[in-house]
Amino acid sequence: MIGAHSADQVRAAERPALDAGMGAELMRRASYGLALTITRELRARRGRVYGARVTGLIGKGNNGGDGLWALAFLARRGVAVTAVLVDTTAHAEGLAALLAAGGRAVRLAPDGSVPGGSTDDGAARLPLCTLTEARDECVRADVLIDAILGTGARGGLRGAAAGLVELLLRERSEGRGLPHVVACDIPSGVDPTTGEVTGPVLPVESTVTFAAAKTGLFLPPGAASAGRVEVIPIGVEDRLGEPVVRRMGAEDVSRLLPRPAAEGHKYTRGVLGVVAGSEEYPGAALLACAGALSAGAGMVRYFGPPSVAALINAALPEVVCHTGPELQGRVQAWVLGSGVSGEEQLDRCRQALSLGQPAVVDAGALDLVGERAVDRPELILTPHAGELARLLTRLGTECDRAEVEATAGASLREAVRLTGTTILLKGPHTLCHEPGGILFSQADGTPWLATAGSGDVLAGVLGALLAQGGVAPSSVGEMGDAGHWAATAALAAAVHGRAGRIASGEADGGRGHPISARDIAHAVRFVWDAP
Ligand SMILES: NC(=O)C1=CN([C@@H]2O[C@H](COP(=O)(O)OP(=O)(O)OC[C@H]3O[C@@H](n4cnc5c(N)ncnc54)[C@H](O)[C@@H]3O)[C@@H](O)[C@H]2O)[C@@H](O)CC1
Ligand SMILES: Nc1ncnc2c1ncn2[C@@H]1O[C@H](COP(=O)(O)OP(=O)(O)O)[C@@H](O)[C@H]1O
Ligand SMILES: [K+]
C-alpha cells in the first residue's frame, strides 16, 4: 500500500529538523537521492554516466536548491551540467556548489528576449539567455530536471518560466523529441496537495519526491503529468502521520481478493442481484453479469425484461434470470443502473435500493440517489466525470464535466459529503472515497480500457466483490481511516485495471492492442493468479 501526504503534513514533519538547523542536511539527502536516480537513468540510456548532459530548470526556492545540489553531484561524476535559472534569484549555497563542481549556470532573461549580457548574482556573473537559447539548452540534454516549483508553490508557472515550458511543450507536440524529464518533488505547476493544475505543466517521465509521495501526485489532473513516482526518505518519515490518500499495489490486491473457503458453497460465496440493461441497451446487462461471474460471485441473479434475459441466458447460461416486476430470491449485494432506461427497470432499481443492502449504483440509477443526504456508505456510486457533474448540479453545486476533471479530488469529496454515499469516480485515475474515510487513487489500467461497456464490467466486478463481503474488516483496520466501502471500490478498480492490462497484452510486457469490454470481463478472472 502506497500512502500519500499533503504538503502541509510533509512540512510539519520537516519542521523539527529545520528548527534544529538540519535544513542543509535534509536538502543534501533529497538532492543526493535525485542525483542517484538520474545516474541510473543515464546508465540505462547511454551505458555510462561520464560525458552525459543534464540540464536543470531551477526556481528560486528550496526546490531549485535541490536541483542545483543534484546538478553539482552529477558534475562531480563527469556529467556536463547546466542550470537554467528561471527566476531573479536562486538558492545561494546550491548555486555556489554547482559552480564549484564545474557546472554552468545561465539565467533566463526576465522577459525571455534579451540576447547576450550578464547579471550580477552575488559571487557569480551569470550569462543571460533568451527563451529559445534556454529551450535549445534543454533539448540538447540527455535528462532534464524540473526543479522550478515544489511544495512552496502558490499557483502555476508565470512569466518567462511559463514561456519556456510552453516552448518545450510545443517541441513535444510537434513531434521533435524532448529529453527524459525528471521532476524534483513534483512537476512544477501541479498543486502538491490537490493535484490541480494552473498554467502550463511539462509532463515528466518520473518524479523523485522527498519524505513522502505528495497527494497531488496521486490526484488528477496533475497525477497524469507525474509519471513514475519514486520516494526518497530524508529522515523525517516517522513524523508524517497517517496518509490522506492511498493506493493499493500488486501485493495488496493479491492479499485482499476474496477466495472461497474450503467448505464454501455458492450461497456462502455470495449471490449478486443485477438490475441492468433495457430493451434499448441490452448489452450493458450482459457485460455486468459477465464481469461479476469472472470476479467470483457464487451466483448471479438477473432482473429485467424478457428480451434481455433471453440474451443473457444465450451467452451466460450460469445466470438465473427473473423477468417479473417484483424482485425475488435472496442476494447479498446489487448492481443497479448500467444500461437502464425506462420506468420498469428504474422501478426495480428503486425496490432494490429500499432493501438497505450494499449496492453499486451506476449510470441510469444515479438519478435515483442524492435528493437529500442519506447516511448510506454501502451505496457505491460509480460515475465518470460527466455523471458526477450532473449529480453535483442536481444537488445544487452547478458544474460541468471539465470542472470536475480539473478539481477531481475536491469534487469527489463534495459529492460524498452531499450524498452520504461512497463514490468511485472513473477515469484514467480512479478515485474512491466514503464518508469520513481517506481517499484511494488507483491507476492500474491502460487507455485501452476507454472502450464502450468497460464501465458495465467494472460495475459487475465491484458488485461481485461486495457480494463476497468486500475487503475483510481486519485488512481495512490496517489501513488507518480507509473505510471498508472505499477500500472495496478501490480493489474493484485495481482488478478492472489489471484485467485491462492482461486483455491488452501489456501485462506480458507487450505494447498493448485494442480490446473490447467482453475481453476485459473475460480477463478479470486471471487477476486472481497474476504475480
Ligand atoms: N524544507 C525542507 O527542509 C526541505 C525542502 N525540500 C525542497 O524544498 C521544496 C520546498 O521549498 P520552498 O518552500 O522554498 O518552496 P519552492 O521551492 O517550491 O518555492 C518556490 C519559491 O517560489 C515562490 N513561488 C511560489 N509560487 C510561485 C509561482 N507560482 N511562481 C513563481 N514563484 C513562486 C515562493 O515564494 C518560493 O519562494 C520542496 O518541494 C523540496 O523540493 C527538500 O530539499 C527537502 C528538505
Ligand atoms: N485513459 C484511461 N486509462 C485507463 N482507464 C481508463 C481510461 N479511460 C477510461 N478508463 C476506465 O474505463 C472505464 C470506462 O467506464 P465508463 O466511462 O463508464 O465507460 P462506458 O460507459 O462506456 O462503459 C472506467 O473504469 C475508467 O476508469
Ligand atoms: K519541481
Image (cartoon, rainbow, N blue to C red):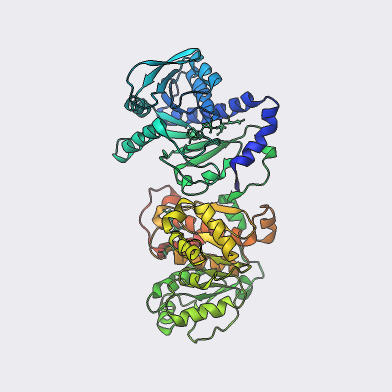
Across and down, in percent, residue 302 comes to 50, 78
The picture quadrant where one finds residue 418 is: bottom right
Across and down, in percent, residue 434 comes to 60, 60
* Residue in view at x 36 percent, y 22 percent: 129
Q: How many marks can you see?
A: 0
Quarter of the picture for ligand 2? Answer: bottom left
Across and down, in percent, residue 146 comes to 46, 32
Question: In screen coordinates, is 203 left or right of 16?
Answer: left
* Residue in view at x 56 percent, y 26 percent: 32
Establish if 16 lies above or below 503.
Answer: above
Establish if 298 lies above or below 60.
Answer: below
Establish if 151 lies above or below 316.
Answer: above
Camera sees residue 501: no
Across and down, in percent, residue 282 comes to 40, 75
Of 366 and 60, the residue lying toward us: 60
Camera sees residue 310: yes
Question: In screen coordinates, is 92 left or right of 405?
Answer: right
Question: In screen coordinates, is 318 left or right of 2?
Answer: left
Establish if 335 lies above or below 217.
Answer: below
